[in-house]
Amino acid sequence: MSAAVEICVKAASGAPDILGDCPFTQKVMLTLEEKKIPYTIKLVDLANKQQWFLDLSPEGKVPIINFDGGDKWVSDSDVIINLIEEKYPVPSLVVPEENASVGSKIFSCFVKFLLSKDPTDGTEQALLDELHAFNQHLTNHGPYVNGSEISAIDLNLAPKFYHLEIVLGHFKNWKIPENLTSIYEYMKLVFNRDSFIKTKAAKEYVIAGWAPKVNV
């Protein structure tokens, strides 16, 4: 089956021929992989956006996706995920409403802590509070957020945990507390899926992608 789906993705910082580190793009690619939808990628050097890309994405953002080879490209990863689910409903990755917000604050808390220069500003504790709550949810309902089957919420969170683990370890010498065992089991589970291995950026490119933000 030929790939009718095309997706523009971030190229690695300093390596425009290699897949880059955007967690929102990986979320979309994970969804395509888990649903076994053939697709092709177009690498975009976001530091040197070419005109063909700006013609498709005037805001210069990735990911954008094309489903049918026509002129219409869709942006915003959440919109894209919903469209994929609508067009390719099997297997279902729909998240029950009661679990839709599980772990939703972890990424923003991670970024605030990463960028913080003040160890007393509460950003570390805010992240720890969110991680403890997520660990408790997994302990009670896991191994995935929605139980025994992977769903869209896991495909959203997995790239963010990958970035969190790499970036906080590198820039702050910080790691998730070892007593949060359900999170460690969760990360092992999602990081070892074929879909994740195929779509993840190499660690050095994750670090390179965050370096300009951290070293301000």
Image (tube, rainbow, N blue to C red):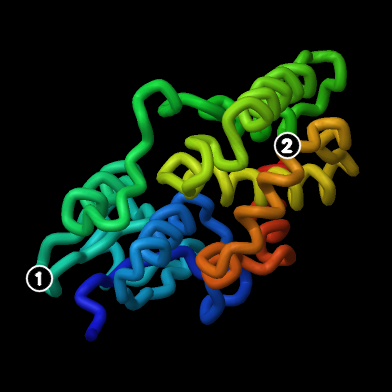
In the image, what residue occupies the spot 72% across and 57% down? Answer: 207
Residue under circle 2?
182
Q: Amino acid at mark 2?
A: Ser
Q: Give the label, 1 or 2, closer to the camera.
A: 2
Instruction: Say left or right for 97 vs 134.
Output: left
Categorize mark 1 by other alpha carbons within 10 Å: few (<14), some (14-19), many (20+): few
**Which quarter of the rendered picture does the C terminus lie within?**
top right
Q: Position of residue 110 (x, y in %)?
A: 67, 33
The answer for how far apart the CA atoms under marks 1 and 2 are is 44 Å
In the image, what residue occupies the spot 70% across and 43% down? Answer: 164
Q: Is residue 71 above or below residue 121?
A: below
Mark number displayed over residue 70: 1
Q: Is residue 65 above or below residue 61?
A: below
Q: Is residue 32 above or below residue 84?
A: below
Residue 215 in view: no
Q: Position of residue 138 (x, y in %)?
A: 63, 32
* Residue contact between numbered discs 1 and 2, judged by CB atoms under 8 Å: no
In the image, what residue occupies the spot 60% across and 68% down? Answer: 197
Q: Secondary structure at mark 2?
A: helix
Name the image quarter holding residue 6.
Answer: bottom left
Residue closest to the eye, 118 or 149: 149
Q: Amino acid at mark 1?
A: Gly
Residue closest to the eye, 112 or 165: 165
Q: Position of residue 133 (x, y in %)?
A: 66, 21
Looking at the image, tell me whether mark 1 or mark 2 is earlier in sequence order: 1
Residue closest to the eye, 173 or 119: 173
Instruction: Say left or right for 4 vs 109.
Output: left
Residue lying farthest to the top in this orientation = 121
